[in-house]
Image: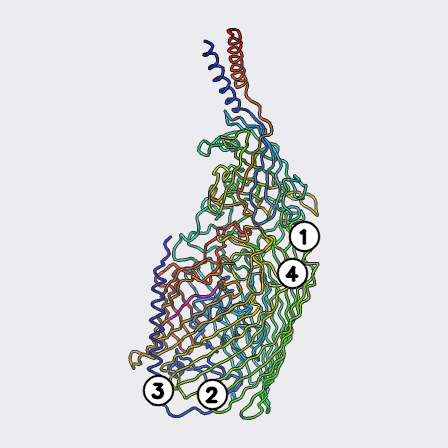
Amino acid sequence: MKKTLLVSGVLALIAGIQTAQAAVGTYNITTTWYEPDTQPRDSIFIGSFTFDDVTHSVTNLQGLLSESMSGDQVAYNPATGINGTDNMNWVSLTNQLANGDATHTYTWHDATLGGTLATVFKNTNSLTFTTLTGGDGWSPQAGVDVGGVYAGYPKKPQATVNPQNAYAMIFVPDNLTAAGSTLSWDEATGSGSLGLAHTAYADFLELVGSGGYDAGGMMGAVGMTATSAWVYGAVGTMSGVPFSQVITAAAVVPEPESYALMLAGLGLLGLASRRQRKSC
Amino acid sequence: MNIPVLSTTRSRKLLAKSVATLLALAAFEASAQEIKITDQKTADSLQTPEIETQPSQPESEITNVLALDPIDIKASRIKDSFSETSNLSKQDIAAKRSKTSDTTELLQGVPGASVYSAGGISGLPVMHGLADDRLHVQVDGMSLMQACPNHMNSVLSYIAPTSVDKIEVSAGISPVSLGGDNLGGTIDVKSKAPEFAKDGEKFLVKGDAGYFHRSNGNARGKNFGFTLAGEYVNLTYAETSSESDNYWAATGGWKKPGAWKANKVGVSLGAPVVAERDVGASEYGGALNRDLGLSFRFSEHLFRINLSRQQLDYEGFPNQRMDMIASIPNPTDTDFPPSYIVDRSKPSNVNTLVNFSYKGQYDWGSLDARVFHQDLRHHMDMIQERNYGMYMPMDTKATTVGGMLKASIDLSERDTLKLGSDFQSYRMGDWWPPIAGGGSMCCNDFWNIRDGKRDRVGLFAEWEARWNPKWLTIAGIRNDVVRMDAGPAQGYSNSSYKKDADIFNAQKHLRIDHNVDWTMLTRYTHDANQTYEAGFARKTRSPNVHERFPWSTFAMAALMNNFVGDGNGYVGNLDLKPEVAHTFSGTIDWHDADKEIWGVKATGYVTIVDNFIDAQRCITCGATNKKTKNAYVILQYINHSAQLYGVDLSGHRLLGRFDDFGSFTGNGVINYVMGKNTTTGDNLYHIMPLNGRFSLAHRLGGWTTTAEIQTVAAKTHVSQVRNEVPTPGYSLLNLSSSYEFKYARLDVGVDNVLNKFYLLPLGGAYVGQGNSMTTGGVPYGMVLPGRGRSINVAVNVRF
């Protein structure tokens, strides 16, 4: 009996510790799209999200997106942080929109890729690209298909019809743990994380005021994007492509079931220990 | 797709057989003629008349079948051209007019010549591997300038093929009196010389009109001209217009798959959908050349003044990232900066020329003088089949004032001295207006080159001596002073451009080059059948403004600076030194006494260039840019050393002449050139691979029918720094026939009869569709294909 309790306690504790890693956690993320035409500056999304590794849901996604065509020719420096060394504009993306119909699904789990793609927008709706010739108006493929032209085109003036939206689509792998995740993608060879290759961004903000930038609309009706030609058939409008992504744990909170199992294990171990002392 | 690689081997074999045949033919004929010919030509026979004999079409034969007007033949020492000089006569040119609307393309088939592909009427000439500004290109004696960061307004686009009467090509070693500031020789394109009423005639009235159509690309055009002349006054007017849709390759499948071709079927915002076999952005329209000339003749003095204008509504450039097309601020847009719209009906390029010249004969020799003024307005944006939502207005304005004074003094029967001076004063501005949308193109004018200046003054002296009937020498020296300057740079904003602009603006822009050229040429005429020539020369060329002054390393801006069609971006270099070439060249010319029956000519040359302006990878444009081998990159001009060498071989043979069936003549031209950057060991860019043209011409009465095989070896020697793409070899069959009589000429032909697919070795990168404004917007690795089969028809009438 004592032996049974001891074994049960140890097993429950181990199970409890293991299941404690199946948790809802908050993570920091830095996704980089390489921009060959604006070097040394890249398009970078720096943000955070909550991830449930059981349901693979990504929630509370938000962050800042750099505009690599703005600022001086100085790269973002992680050591000094946003605008520590660089002076690029950073667009605030705060709206992780709820999924709608099939063409308006912004966050979804892809079993083939082994992870979740999640999108956060600047606006409270997803309209980004023109829908004059069809398309859903926001997805990376729709952007490629319309050549990166802004929503509302060809109506003028742009300032009125362009909703000036922006978004970042990130990839969260299923096997994300508290240790974090590092992914890379080589567009030249098509090697690396296929999930990362599916990530994209779009930035259609227009100039505000004169004498400086507020955003990174590119040329006329074409905004700035990054996509992989391996996935979407074309690279971004300024040749931007997925490059790297680093996820680190900000805080991991184990789920209640895990806590219960672990406590049960500890309880069994304690009971076994007490009986052992009594028998002595 | 399957590219016929085997054709490379076939091409080489065919070329090798052809070389052997030509050499065997030459050896046989030379030995035979040496036995028959014992008399040697007198000194006077060295003097070339102003009418060229034409080996491929004997003059006597033309005279037999055409009722030509009487022609004055004046002997002239000045025109004593060397064998390295190739003259394209009126007859040569007439046969080519139905094939092309690009005057540069008329050079195809000239030994040593080839053409960089560009727009439909704006190819860039190449001689012995040296192209574009490395050649001295003249139109009616004017040393004209290009004023575009892509050299879209090629000098030879200023004159239409139908207006060209004669082309003189001096490859490699040209006398210093023909001009300086070049390495590779001179191309002199001339319109028809003024005619005057002859003694006894009160008035001369002449006119001509023509029309052509080519099935590939639906190219069409017309020309019209007239001459009114008395004994002392001549008034001439000529007008030519042409247009074309996109041309197409023999097949599709040569474009890389993917969504980069924004206008795919079913997804188009009104821009035309480009079919798979069509070459996007190769169309042109509204090309109009007009020339009004007034000439006066007084005794031995000829004064000419010509006013001409070339204008063009639009012209696509499939190997450039922009096109010549007008765009204007959207009138309904009140924002600043405004958005733009394309306007195809407005001329995007207008070149206006005033050319005043004088030529006089005196007891002591002759005097030539010229002053000209060139005014050029040029606008670029994008033909909307690239990307319907993309605009980038770019403007260039340039003026050139030039002139020349040359005296040819007959010192004695033996010696002629040529003294002279020429000058060129070039002013230009190259700016790109801002557009709505923020980002990279707001909010100020981008000044690629502001207040650009390039002034050149040259002085020369040349001594020509006929030592005896066998020996002729020419020795000349010239000095050119080139002064270049530019104002401050400015980007669209203080964002991506400020750092580069600050670096450029902190430097002194004034550059003064003192260039010295010299040429030594000698000809030995062994007998009526054999002539040998040798030459040694030093030639110098100062950089052009777009090699020295473009300053921005920002990819989009750099991509706008490119005149070689390789898809890469270029950054200027203020510290470039002038290129200095030393060339040694030798020519053997064997032929029958009248050059009618047979002839073989071979020219070998070696050119060593110090400070050759090549390119290196931009060192501040990221690590990937430095090392990538499969992408378009950003380059910066830099002085290196280079070496070029090669051989031109040409020949003709009258195969038979029959009373009832006419004559049959075989012609052949083979060109070989190699170019190396001896600093890096890399190959030079756009070196034409071994190639040849072989034709059989049949003439009967006014009919001339020609079957031509054009064969080109694979291009395997490619420039690595530019990520140049190799091309496979190919062979084409072309057929043409013409009928000419006093009042008309009809040309009918089929180019690429077998409709073979091929890639142009000098075609450059295909970036004629998609997002061409970025390094990766159009997939790397596509080469401009050649035309599929085309049926060509042209008719010209004279009255």
User: Badge 4 is on which residue?
Assistant: B449
Q: Nearer the viewer, residue B224 or B533?
A: B533
Q: Secondary structure at mark 2?
A: helix
In 3D space, how far apart are the residues under numbered discs 4 and 1 (Cα atoms)?
15 Å
Segment tinted magenta in the rendering? B686-693
Q: How many marks?
A: 4
In 3D space, how far apart are the residues under numbered discs 3 and 1 (Cα atoms)?
72 Å
In 3D space, how far apart are the residues under numbered discs 4 and 3 (Cα atoms)?
60 Å
Q: Could one spot residue B354 in this view of the protein?
A: yes
On the same chain, marks 4 and 3? The answer is yes
Q: Is residue B434 left or right of residue B183?
A: right
Q: Which mark is residue B498?
A: 1
Q: Is residue B481 left or right of residue B414?
A: right
Q: Position of residue B362 (x, y in %)?
A: 59, 89
Q: Could one spot residue B337 in this view of the protein?
A: no
Q: Residue furthest top?
A: A278
Q: Position of residue B435 (x, y in %)?
A: 63, 50
Chain letter belonging to callout 3 = B
In 3D space, how far apart are the residues under numbered discs 1 and 2 (Cα atoms)?
63 Å
Amino acid at the residue labelled 4: Ile
